[in-house]
Image (cartoon, grey):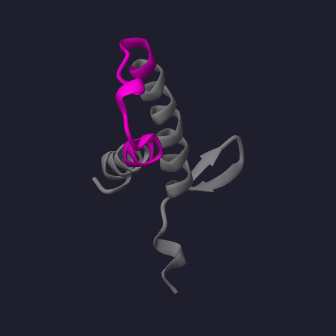
Amino acid sequence: MLGGCDPIIDLGGAFFPGWLVAALGGLFGMILVRQIFCWVGIEEHLTFRGAAYLGVFVMIAVSLWYAFFLT
């Protein structure tokens, strides 16, 4: 019943849910942050890299969701 409340994005005639767009943005943002960490030299000092990058992914995805779909 609440399926109609989900924001839908129209990209070239195909409709995508808003959470998918936020997740893809989070993925690309995480890759960018990883490249910055490697360039600066922080990555080699990370103990739990998987958890750190998962946290970065979630932070960026939720921030994009709030910025674009909950305003």
Q: Which of 33 and 45 is in front in this view?
A: 45
Please name the residue shown 42% across and 49% down the image. Answer: 51
Nearest the viewer among 35 and 17 is: 35
Residue 69 magenta-highlighted: no
Q: Is residue 1 above or below residue 46?
A: below
Residue 14 in sight from this viewpoint: yes
Residue sticking out furthest to the left: 71
Of helix, strand and loop, which mostly describes the magenta segment? helix
The image shows a total of numbered marks equal to 0
In this rendering, the answer to whether 27 lies above or below 7 is above
Q: In this view, does 45 lie to the left or right of 16?
A: left
Which x, y percent locates residue 58? Answer: 40, 50
Q: In this view, does 20 lie to the left or right of 40?
A: right
| Residue 46 drawn at (x, y percent) | 37, 34
Instruction: Identify the residue shown where x is 62% and y is 54%.
Output: 16
Magenta stretch: give its range: 37-56
Quadrant hosting residue 42: top left
In front of the other: 44 or 28: 44
Q: Position of residue 25 (x, y in %)?
A: 49, 39
Residue 66 in the figure: left or right of residue 19: left
Within the magenta stretch, is there residue 54?
yes
Q: Which residue is drawn at 35% across and 28% down?
A: 45
Residue sticking out furthest to the top: 39
Q: In this view, which residue lies farthest toward the bottom?
A: 1
| Residue 24 vs residue 15, the one in the foreground | 24
